[in-house]
Structures are given as C-alpha cells and as structure tokens.
Image: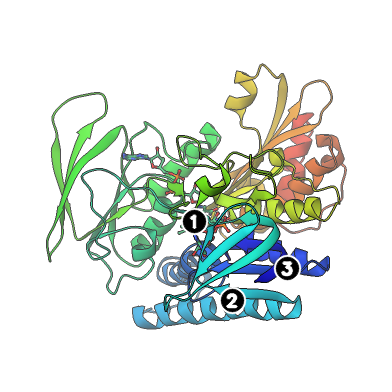
Amino acid sequence: MAQYDVVIIGGGPAGYNAAIRAGQLGLRVAVVELSQTLGGTCLNVGCMPSKALLHASEMYDAAKTEFATLGIDVSPKLNLPQMMKQKAESVGALTKGIEFLFKKNKVDWVKGAGKLAGPGKVEVTAADGAVQTLEAANVVIATGSEPAGLPGVTVDQKRIVDSTGALSLSEVPKSLIVIGAGIIGLELGSVWRRLGAEVTVVEFLDRITPGMDAETAKAFQRSLTKQGMIFKLGSKVTGATADKKGVSLTVEPVAGGAAETLKADYVLLAIGRRPFTDNLGLDSVGITPDKRGFIDTDHWRTSAPGVWAIGDVTHGPMLAHKAEEEAVACIETIAGKAGHVSYGIIPSVVYTSPEVAWVGRTEEELKEQGVAYKSGKFPFSANSRAKINHETEGFVKVLADATTDEVLGVHMIGPQVGEMIGEYCVAMEFKAASEDVARTCHPHPTRSEALRQAAMGVEGWTMQA
Ligand code: FAD
Ligand code: NAI
C-alpha cells in the first residue's frame, strides 16, 4: 500500500496549490484526480476559459465599437472556431503547467476517483476499474463544486446549458436567456452579447450580483443595460422546454402575477454552485456535510481527525484565490507551521467591461453592523489616463473607519479595475489608514491615481475632481 504524509482528493486550485506547497515543505504527497487533466473547474471549465473568451470578445467588440474613435477603421469578422481553439490551447498549456509543477515538486498524480475508506485510507478507482488504496497521515478533501440545478429546467448542454456548455457553444445564439444575474451569468452573458446575441437576464432578486456593494451594483446594471443586456429582475423561472430549435421558459414575477413565456435559442442556467461530495465516503470517517452540502471546518480541520477540507467544498466565497489561500494555510498547519487566511480581505472581481472589483465590507454591511465610516469616491471621468483612453466609466469608492481611518472596504467599477484591487488588499493586510494610501505617491498618468484620489476623498481633499 502506497504511504504518504498527505493525500489530497481533487486537483483544482485548492488541491494543486496544497500539493505544491506540501512538496516544497518536503512532505510525501499525492493528488487523486478523477478528470483526465489537472486544474479542476478553474483551469478547465471556469476562470481560465471564461477569461479567454471575455478577452477575445472584448477585443472583437472594441474593434467594432471603439477603434473608429481612435482613428482605426476596421471591419472585424468573427471566427468563432479560432476563438474557441485559442481558448482550448491556452487551457491545455495551463493544465500541462500544473503537471510540470507536480513533477518539479515531487507530487504523485494518482488518476481516478478518490474515496475515503476509513481513517487514514483513500481508495482510488481508476477509469479502467482498477482499485488501489493509499495510506496517509493526512487526507485533504478538495473536491470543489458543481453547478446548482433548478427544478423544471433540465440542463442538456445542447439548448439549455450550464457554464461548461456556455463556454463551448458552436454558434453565436440569436437570443440567449441567462437565469441568474450572478457573476457567471453576467460574464458569460457579456461574452455572447459582444459576439452578437440578444441577451436577457432573468433574476430572482430585485437587484443584480447579490453581495456586491449596492451603489456599485446599480452602476454595473446601468452599464450592462446601456450595452444592450436586458434585465428581468424579481422574476422566477418555473419551467423550461427545449427542442432542436430553441427553448421556451415560463417566468413568473416573484411578487405574484401572471406567468409569461420567453423564447430563446439557448438558455444558460447560472444560479450558483454547490459543493461536490458525491461518492466521497464521508460517512466512513464520520463526517456529515451541513444541509447545503458544505463540509464544516475549523481552521481547515474537519470533525474527523487527520481529515481536512479546503476550497469550494467548504464554506466561504467560491473563488480560486480563496481556495489557494486555504491550500497553503492548511498544508502549513499540517507541517506544524502557523497557517493563516485573512478571510475579510479576499477580493472579488467580475471580468466584464467595465470590470467590477471589491475587497472588504460593503456600505450595507457596515450600516448593518453599526460601524461608523467615512467614504471617498473618485470618478474615472476625472482621471487623466482614463480620459485620454476614452474609458471614463465608473468610480473608485473607499470606505474607512470614522474614528481610526482604517480602510474597511473598497469598491470599484471601471476599466480593468481587477488589476488594481490588489493594492488595497495589501493596504488592508497592513491595516492601512485611508490617509496612508492618500499620501502614497502614485505614477502619473495612470488609472491607479484614482485609487489615491478616492482615498484623499475620505478626508475631503481630492484634488483632481
Ligand atoms: P475545483 O476547481 O472544482 O476542483 C475540484 C477537483 O476535484 C476537480 O478537478 C474534480 O474533478 C476533482 N474531484 C471531485 N471529486 C473527486 C473525487 N472523488 N476523486 C478525485 N477527484 C475528484 N474563481 C475565481 O477566483 N476567479 C474567476 O475568474 C472564476 N471564474 C469562474 C468561471 C466559471 C465559469 C466557474 C464555473 C467558476 C469560476 N471561478 C472563478 C470559481 C473557481 O473555478 C472555483 O472557486 C475553484 O475552481 C475552486 O477550486 P477547488 O479546487 O476548490 O475546486
Ligand atoms: P452567483 O451566486 O454569483 O449568482 C447566482 C444568481 O442567481 C444570484 O443573483 C441569485 O439571486 C440568482 N438566482 C438564484 N436562484 C435563482 C432562480 N431560481 N431564478 C433566478 N435567479 C436565481 O452564482 P453563479 O453566477 O452561478 O457563480 C457561482 C460561483 O462561481 C460564484 O459564487 C463565484 O464565486 C464563482 N465565479 C467567480 C467568478 C469570478 O471570480 N470572476 C466568475 C464566475 C464564477
């Protein structure tokens, strides 16, 4: 029986980062992965292919709608097979990269479905049915998540697709209905709208992107509406029928009232994801998931001795960088070091155009918690680099403690703000006051000056607006 210090079930961002860190720390480590490639949801059917299509479709859209302003006259023609091919090639290179890192860090990749088989044992069933058992002092569950279903709406990956199907459509839909105005719905809805689809988003709540600062979400919805996305808020889908030509959806107002039928070429179901623990043998070590299916942990330890859980399968935001943080902290704890995750400083980014990025608490959360705060806001319309680039939509908003001036939350919408939120993550990690950022020299002319100007705004001395 092969013996390890750590066996990790799942080779996504949680699993592969844990494995690499374990290898670096000299632990004997194996990753059990049932899929043919490493990288999990993120690399294969999540973060990376979606960003490949977001980038390509943004370029296409810019060529059609923005280049002429810059004095570049072009008539772009979509080559969807090539767009999909470059996506697949990039994804292939990334998953191969993890294989390389496994070799470099002496991580064994055991191919097959892993299952807990009592304390310290993981049974692996390979694709050909061969079974082997691995012995480990520590087992880390990193099995991730899968799309949540909706009764009455059967995903067939032909006409009714989930995010995986929506990343590989073979044609541009004339019409696409997205169920759920969350991050997946708006990112992938943006891709297909830019490529020519009429996109309607049906959302249960009376707002988009729950969890996002409300003022920012309103600005975001305005922007997407201006781009042509249609929103039906406060609406629930009660059924869907698909045939070869398209889909009919029954939609009812949440507040009550008459149902209506919406028709579209394709439907994307994107109403959230649920933890994946099917056939994992949790009962063999006495773990019972909570009622939503998540595995409860205390500093990544489950209720079973020697069994740990990280990433989407446990609580917290379902984000690759959260999974990565937990992976490192969990392995460092196993190795006797002090693992730590700053759960209050996990950034979020929506990679649409404009992008939305935030970290820390929203205004609504601060009000709910009775925290007195000051805010500073700076529009990109007053930022010289944004102006010169004709990208003036959006703003940066900084929320700071009214007494101590500590930065408590930052919310931005605008051009590539996802690349800028890291500055505030570092500031918050160091418990910076807004004045620390306000008095830090930023390069001119850059959009990052808006970060500083918003911080200056907390004390009311914004200089450029
Ligand atoms: P996963 O990546 O889901 O990996 C789990 C792995 O475990 C899988 O490879 C699975 O095959 C394997 N597995 C499961 N059960 C077993 C078993 N019994 N035996 C062996 N192997 C098993 N997050 C971001 O931070 N940024 C983004 O831009 C972003 N974009 C996204 C876009 C889309 C369309 C989607 C769907 C998700 C996106 N996410 C994004 C979320 C991100 O993909 C997840 O948060 C991340 O992948 C979670 O990592 P994980 O390792 O916990 O799980
Ligand atoms: P989500 O939780 O972001 O949004 C789901 C939306 O669907 C919500 O607005 C919810 O109110 C709505 N909804 C729920 N039930 C509904 C119903 N019956 N009818 C209509 N609307 C309904 O989930 P999503 O978009 O599926 O994404 C899943 C996860 O993947 C996210 O939580 C996120 O963590 C991750 N992700 C992250 C990305 C990023 O970081 N850029 C990109 C894509 C996904």
Q: For this view, does 92 lie left or right of residue 322?
A: left
| Residue 450 drawn at (x, y percent) | 71, 47
| Residue 94 drawn at (x, y percent) | 59, 76
Q: Secondary structure at mark 1?
A: loop
Identify residue for label 2. 94
Q: Does residue 318 appear anywhere in the picture?
A: no
Identify residue for label 1. 352
Q: Earlier in the sequence, mark 3 or mark 1?
A: 3
Q: Earlier in the sequence, mark 1 or mark 2?
A: 2
Amino acid carrying mark 3 in the image? Ile
Mark 1 or 2: in front is 2
| Residue 302 drawn at (x, y percent) | 64, 42
Mark 2 vs mark 3, CA separation in Å: 15 Å
Q: Residue at x 58, y 66 (%)?
A: 11
Give the answer, above or below, for where 27 lies relative to 312: below
Decide: few, some or many residues near mark 2? Use Cα within 10 Å; few <14, some 14-19, many ≥20.
some
Q: Residue at x 58, y 41 (%)?
A: 315
Q: Is mark 1 within 8 Å of ligand 2?
A: no
Q: Does residue 406 appear anywhere in the picture?
A: yes
Identify residue for label 3. 20
Amino acid carrying mark 1 in the image? Thr
Q: Which image quarter holds the N terminus? A: bottom right
Q: Which image quarter holds the C terminus? A: top right
Q: For this view, does 198 lie left or right of residue 56?
A: left
